[in-house]
Image: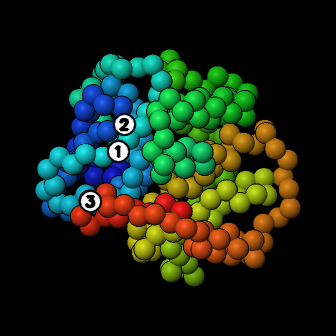
């Protein structure tokens, strides 16, 4: 199961710890749950982004998990939300800089500044205020803004089917470009996992493309050779590896 599925079905609890950079996650079900770095959880004392990929085993008990804030200023209950734990979000980080921050676990003040830049870029692209009255600094609430969502619908409708086409049964990941420049890529061990994550991955990519749509002119078309070189360079980069849990290592290039 993915984290949004598990949270929606009450099979996982993400607990507030009072520490900005660490939460705890508890799998109360008999199924394993996959968490991806960049998953946003909503509520608590402050919206957070989970900073590591990990598999949470069945009946796990509470496990610490690295996180960072994607909302500045708030450190209290918001509206009718529960301050002690977090609810499901259908959003992932929608910025290359923020995704790198998740993997590198940078300081929350810096991630907060990058979240602010993304909110500002989205507002500029939408030519409107996209902040929420409930929390003007919340990246999650900006991503939920109706005008932002409507502005990305065209990307999503155009591209949603490409990963589920009849001849795409062996798709394991994707590469995307904005304004003619390769942005990033995600590759997964199985087609099934990728298919589950694809709608959220596409939405995050569309959100980033929208935020940058007013900032740059399109350059040359991206070719298959460009993409091959991009993936090869990533594979050949020096890497470090660290165990998140006994069965989940993560690597950084």
Q: Residues within 10 Å of mark 2 (few under 14, many from 20)?
A: some
Residue marked by disc 3:
245
Query: Residue 4: x percent and y percent?
Result: 35, 50
Residue occupying the point 46% across, 69% down: 188
Q: Is residue 223 above or below residue 42?
A: below
- CA gap, disc 1 and disc 3: 12 Å
Q: Is residue 232 above or below residue 207?
A: below
Q: Nearer the viewer, residue 170 or 156?
A: 170
Query: Residue 134: x percent and y percent?
Result: 45, 19
Would residue 109 be visible to someone looking at this image? yes
- CA gap, disc 2 and disc 3: 17 Å
Which numbered marker is on residue 21?
A: 2
Label 1 vs 3, first from the N-terminus: 1
Q: Are marks 1 and 2 in contact (CB under 8 Å)?
A: yes
Secondary structure of residue under mark 1: strand
Quadrant hosting residue 23: top left
* Quarter of the figure that contains the N terminus: bottom left
Label 2 vs 3, first from the N-terminus: 2
Residue occupying the point 41% across, 20% down: 74
* Quarter of the figure that contains the C terminus: bottom right
Residue marked by disc 1:
66
* Left or right of 117 in this view: 72: left
């Amino acid at each position: 199961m993915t984290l949004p599925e598990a949270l929606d079905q009450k099979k996982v609890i993400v607990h507030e710890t009072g520490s900005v950079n660490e939460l705890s996650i508890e799998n109360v079900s008999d199924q394993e749950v996959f968490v991806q770095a960049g998953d946003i959880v909503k509520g608590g004392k402050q919206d957070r982004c989970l900073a590591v990929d990990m598999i949470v085993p069945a009946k796990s008990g509470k496990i610490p998990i690295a996180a960072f804030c994607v909302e500045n200023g708030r450190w209290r209950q918001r509206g009718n939300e529960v301050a002690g734990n977090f609810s499901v979000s259908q959003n992932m980080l929608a910025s290359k800089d923020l995704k790198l921050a998740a993997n590198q676990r940078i300081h929350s003040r810096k991630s907060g500044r990058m979240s602010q830049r993304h909110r500002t870029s989205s507002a500029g692209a939408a030519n409107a205020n996209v902040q929420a009255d409930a929390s003007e600094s919340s990246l999650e609430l900006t991503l939920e803004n109706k005008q932002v969502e409507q502005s990305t619908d065209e990307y999503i409708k155009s591209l949603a089917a490409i990963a589920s086409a009849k001849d795409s049964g062996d798709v394991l990941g994707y590469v995307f470009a904005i304004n003619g420049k390769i942005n990033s890529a995600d590759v997964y061990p199985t087609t099934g996992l990728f298919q589950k994550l694809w709608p959220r991955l596409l939405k995050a990519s569309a959100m980033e493309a929208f935020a940058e749509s007013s900032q740059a002119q399109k350059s040359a078309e991206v070719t298959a050779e460009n993409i091959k070189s991009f993936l090869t360079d990533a594979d050949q980069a020096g890497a470090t590896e660290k165990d998140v849990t006994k069965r989940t290592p993560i690597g950084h290039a």
